[in-house]
Structure formats: structure tokens, C-alpha cells
Image (cartoon, rainbow, N blue to C red):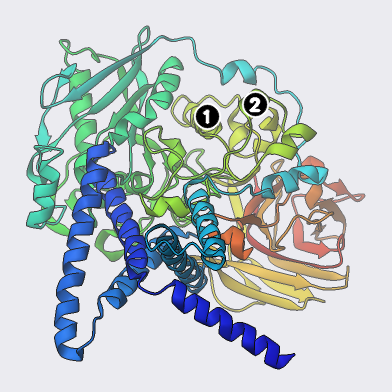
Amino acid sequence: MRKFLRGRLQGYGRAYRLNLKDTGWGMKLVVLVITGFFCGALASEYFGTKLIFFVGGVILGDMLFAGAACLFSRIGGRIWHRNIESFLYGIAGFLIFVCCCVYGSVGNEHMVSTFFAALIYFLLLLSGRFIWAWLVKRRHTLFSGIHFAVGCIVWCAFLAFLFGQGFSDRYISDYLKKNIYVTQAGEVAGFADYCAKGAYTPVCLTYGPDGGTDMTTGIVDLSPYVAKEKKWHRIYRSFFTKHTRKDAPIAGKIWFPKEAENCPVVFMAHGNHSITAESYRGYDYLGEYLASHGYVFVSVDENILNERSGENDARAVLLLENIGEILEKNGDESQPVYSKIDEDNIALMGHSRGGEMIADAYLFNEYDAYPSNGMFTFDYHYRIRALIAVAPSVSQYLPAGHETELSDVDYLVLQGANDQDISVFLGNEQYENVSFSKDRSYIASSLYIAGANHGQFNTEWGEYDIGRPFSLWLNVKNSIEAEQKGTLLHNEKIADNVKNFITAEDQQEILKIASLVFLDKSLKEKDTYADFLTDYAKYAEYLPETLYVQQYETSDALFITDYEEDSDLETAPCGSVSAEHFTMWTEEELADSESAMGKRENHAVRLKWKDTKAAYYEIALDEPMAMGEGGICFDAMDLREKAENEPMDFSVVLTDIHGNRAVSTLCDSTILYPAFPVKLSKIQYITGKNEYKRQLQTVHITEKQFTEGNGFDRSQIRSVRFAFDRIENGAVNMDNIAFVN
């Protein structure tokens, strides 16, 4: 038998070598196709989507590649006296293909992506040679025909894989089918009418320095804040704009209510994207919506700073200069925006790098000098009261080497779990760097949205979060068919059809509603629906069908501990700590995600227990503390990796100075979600690898939700105990334990 198999393998080897003889050009053609497409896709990304740019990129790329391969093969032939052209083609093509795959495989380990890219590349080369043998060399044997057919199948499968939207990820529907993870919210009187289109008529106009706009504005010199470009970059930019860093245009688009005056104003800043896209136009849906509700909305054009690095401080200055220009027009009777803006009520809003930048702009607005060079001075001091960050970056600019810390400003941040650009919730870091005094009511609120990506918040960016050709490796399979939209979240039909992405319309709807509620509370001081920022679940019926994780902090919180004081597990700022029956008890720095190298510079306690319902964690207070009607709140994170049949639950026990107790449970207040097992790239479906996305959730247990023992004195609380008596196995992080007045 062994001799027979050896003979068959040797026969196959001979047939293989004979069939592939002189088929090197089949391999070279595959490499040229890969190289040409790569260069063509890059050209269309950087110069525009017209076919001429793609074709030009293909031709130029292949010509340069073939020329370089020929040159180096001649040099190599003189050195090694062998023809190495095929070898050069194979290696160069491999590097291009693998780099493209690895860069586009967001959420994968690089070694895994490299392995699969190498495997796919080898199969494509081999298929190319078999196809060449059949079509060009005319080797029409049964052996050749079979391998020709297999080669065609390989190429068809690869092209379908590459150009298709990807695969259906069912992590959202898996949670929804388990009814325990679905919020059964009722109706909220008037909210449907509240978040519909407003009563005002939106009016739109443009502004800029170059003519052809409704308002003429000026320019600003950004050269102190952004590095000088290299010559080739300046030449490239000259194709798309006549402006430079020294004469950056003050330009954008304004939406305002026709019938109203003295309106609060929102200045919106986009992030980094292709310079060929007019990114500032991608928020028209939001401008029209907010204008109908009595806001002026200004979308600032910062395209002059796109496709740069180290420019976020310049973005902040450009935004502030736009504010100054628009406010000046507001006081000019000859201008169409005359008297439209309430200059005491300004909000900043930003997306991506713009979402990070608005925090820097807020600082610059308070400062009198540029932190990186005090020889450049500021004189802004506008009345900015609120910030909204959408999928923000972090640490693009560190003022004087420090993290950007904010105080006494309302802050809202939103992020999608399926963000393929900023794939971890970097906005957490800025959220955690917001602090409040007690002189008025402030709030910081965060909303993490399952199925939301990065680009769909902007209509000009779309469903792909990275540029061509790398975007072809992303998984962007959309969610619900159009005719199914509007069906309630807990409907089984929807639960069967929700996949990994929510639609662009749904994603934008979430941003519209959250922004309106936040701005109304912060700028108009309307609190009718302000609890949306602390209890989204109450409004679940009015939100698009997906999962939400909410975290918040208010200025009326009286902290027991936030775990930032030291490394002693048995101490807290207000008392001492004890714990029993855990397999793990530690205080740790939270990571952005399980696969992320970076840390959040935020600490929390980690508790893990197994096969017990007796574990507890207790803080004994040095001095008695009072619990107001607001009750107690804390942040918690379920560290399990999948949706279990029972949600995370445990008891919260308060004990007063007399030994009387009040008890409540986690599930009385909040559904605590386990990790979202997200797959961002197509290769993750081949490997079966998930990226587990976890976020802290704020648990708020009101005074009324506690079952109090006889004589319990809520003004004299001596200890807070978390008793893990509801499920036998689990693990949690907890942070920011506080009483709420």
C-alpha cells in the first residue's frame, strides 16, 4: 500500500511539473493584477473616484513595478548568474498583498492575518499558473482541465470574498433572543413628538473666502500650529485646494431656524478623511434637524488639515477662529445670520479627530497662550458650555505634554462597537478626565452603541472606515431590510434579522436624538427628558434596534471611592475594604480592549468568584455618610465573554450605624451586558476569532429601590456591601462608587 501511494504521488508530481512548465507568466500576471489593483485603488482614494484615476493608477503602478523587477533581475543575474525575475515578482507581490490584508484586517492578530494572507496568495499564484497552462499553453489534458477548473473556482471565491460585504455576525440578535437582555420599556409621554422634526423652518447657507458663498469670510495663518509640508505633499494638495497652512480658509455651512432669533449655537468639526471629500457636508442631516428645534448649527470645513499628522492643535485654532468670525457676522445687520445666535450658549461638537479636538479647543478658549509655545497668544474666551464627541481619537495632541483635562463643562461621548477606524472606545479617556465642582448641575454621559461604525455618522464617509484598497477586507454586512424597519426591538422577527451593522439612517437617528436631549439640557436648561442621558433604557421603544451601554457621572455625586488613590486593596478614601470567598481580588488599570496594548489610565476593582454564593466585597466607612433620594450609583462591567442564560446579578447591602440594613439587587436597576463579541474584518470569520468589547455601565439604584429594614437610617450609613449571592460563577470590574444627592 505504501509503495502504491508513493507511486501515485510521484506520478502526480511529474504531471504537476509538466503541466506547470513555462507558466511563469501566469504567476507574473497574477502579481501584476494585484499590484495594478492596489495602485489603482490608492489612486482613486487620494485623487478621486473617477475611473480615469483608477485606470491611471493601474497602468502607472504596473509599469513602475515591471520596470523595477526587470532592473533588479538584471542586477541580480550579474551577481548570482541566475534569472531571479520570477522570484522578485513573487516576493514583491507577496509583500503588497500581505501588507494590504494585515492593514485591512482590523481586530485580528497580525500573525494570524499574515498566515491567511500568505495562504490565499499562494493559492492565487498557483491558480494563475494552471489557468495560464490551459488558456495559453493549450495543455488540454484531464489533469490540466481539473486544475484549471479548480483555479477558476479559487479566483471566483476570492473575488466574491474580497468584493462582497462580508458575513453576518449575529451577536446583537443572540442577545436579543435571550429576553433577559431586552429592555421592556413602556411609553414616555410626548417623547415621540419631542424627537420628531421640530416646528421651525431650517435655512441653510454657506460661508467662505473664495466667492460663490452666501457669506464672505477671511483666512487664518495656522503655520505656528502645524508643521511645514514636504514639497511633494504641497504639490499633491495643490490639485485640490489653492490654500495652504498660512492662509487656511474660514469656511463651512450654517443651518438656522428661519423664524427664531437669539438661538443656542453648535459648532461641528469633522475629523481626518480623504482631502477629496467635502467632509463638512456630511452633517447636513444633523444641521437640518437641530435647526428645526431652534438651534444654529455650523459645520466647519477643516479639510485643509486633512491627510496630515500632528495637526489637532491647528484644528482647534481653526475651529475657534470660525467661532469668532461667525459671532462677528451675528452682530452685523447686513449679514443673513444677524441676531440669530445667543453668544452665551455655545456648544462644540466633533467627530473622530474633531471629537478629540473640541476638548483642546475648550482649553485654548480658556487659555491666554498656546501651551506648546507661549510666544503665540490667544484671546478667545467664548462662552462654551457643552461638548459632544462622536467616536473621538485621543492623544493626537497633548497640551504641554499633559492629557487634556476638562472641568465644569457638560460632556457627551458616543462610540460604535463596530468602529473599524478607532476600534476601541478611546473617548473613555477623555470622559474620565472630566471633573465637576458643585456650583451648578453638570453631567458627563457616554453611550456605546452595538453595530455602529465610524463613518456612518457622516454621510460623506459611509460604511467603510478605512481607505481603499484596505477597506475590502472589512466586514460591512448590513442589518435589517428596509421593509422591516420600525418594528420594535424585542420583536422576534427583528431579532432574527439584526446582524453586525446597523444602518446609516439608524446610526444618525441615535446621534440626532442624543444630541437634542443633551443640548436642550445643557444650553436651554430643559430637563423634561434629561434622564435619557442617565437612563436610556426608559426610552428604548424610541431608539433604533440595537444594544446600548451607558455610563454617566453627575456633579451631585458624593464619591466613596474611584480606586485612583493607591495600590492598597484594603483601603478606600472614606474607609477600609474587606473581601471574602473570591478567587481573584485586585485593583487594576483597565485596558481599552483585550487585544489593545494601551491602557485607559483608569483603575477599578476586579472581583472573580467560582462555585459560591457567599462572596462579598465591603467598604466600611470611617464616618457615616448620607444617602439622598438619588440613592447610590457605581460603574460595573460584566467580564463574561458571551450572553449567558442568566444576566449578571448581585445584591447591594447598606448598613447604618445601628446595624439596620437596606437591600437591593443589580437587576432591579440595570441590565448589565457581557462583552460584545465583535468581528470587524472578514478574516475573523475564517479564524472564528472575536474581539470582545467591554464597557463600564453605570448602575443607579434609587432610594425607593431599596428594601429597608425597620428603623434603617439612610442619613447614617456605616457600610456598603456588594454580596455576590445571585449567581455562582462570575467576574466583574467595579468603579466610581458614590451616593447621589
Could you tell me if residue 434 is visible in this image? Answer: no
Mark 1 and mark 2 residues within 8 Å of each other at the beta carbon: yes
Q: Position of residue 492 (x, y in %)?
A: 79, 35
Q: Nearer the viewer, residue 697 or 738?
A: 697
Please provide percent x and percent y for residue 90: 34, 72
What residue sits 21% from the left and 64% below the top? Answer: 66
Residue 549 screen position, x and y as percent: 63, 47
Q: Which residue is mark 1?
A: 505
- Residue lying furthest top in this view? 259
544 vs 123, left or right, is right
Residue furthest to the right: 710
Q: Which residue is painted at 64% across and 89% down in the image?
A: 6
Q: Is residue 227 above or below residue 390?
A: below
**Residue at the spot of label 2:** 485
Viewer-nearest residue: 422 or 727: 422
Q: Which mark is residue 324?
A: none
Q: CA distance from mark 1 to mark 2?
A: 10 Å
Q: Residue at x 61, y 46 (%)?
A: 500
**Outermost residue, bottom side:** 3
On the image, which quarter does residue 489 sit in? Answer: top right
Task: Tell me the element at label 1.
Answer: helix
In the displayed structure, 360 sits above or below 62; it is above
In percent of the image, x 16 and y 89: which residue is there?
A: 79
Judged from the image, the secondary structure of the residue bearing numbered disc 2 is loop
Q: Amino acid at mark 1?
A: Glu
> Where's residue 13, x and y in %?
53, 81
Query: Does residue 34 appear in this view?
Result: yes
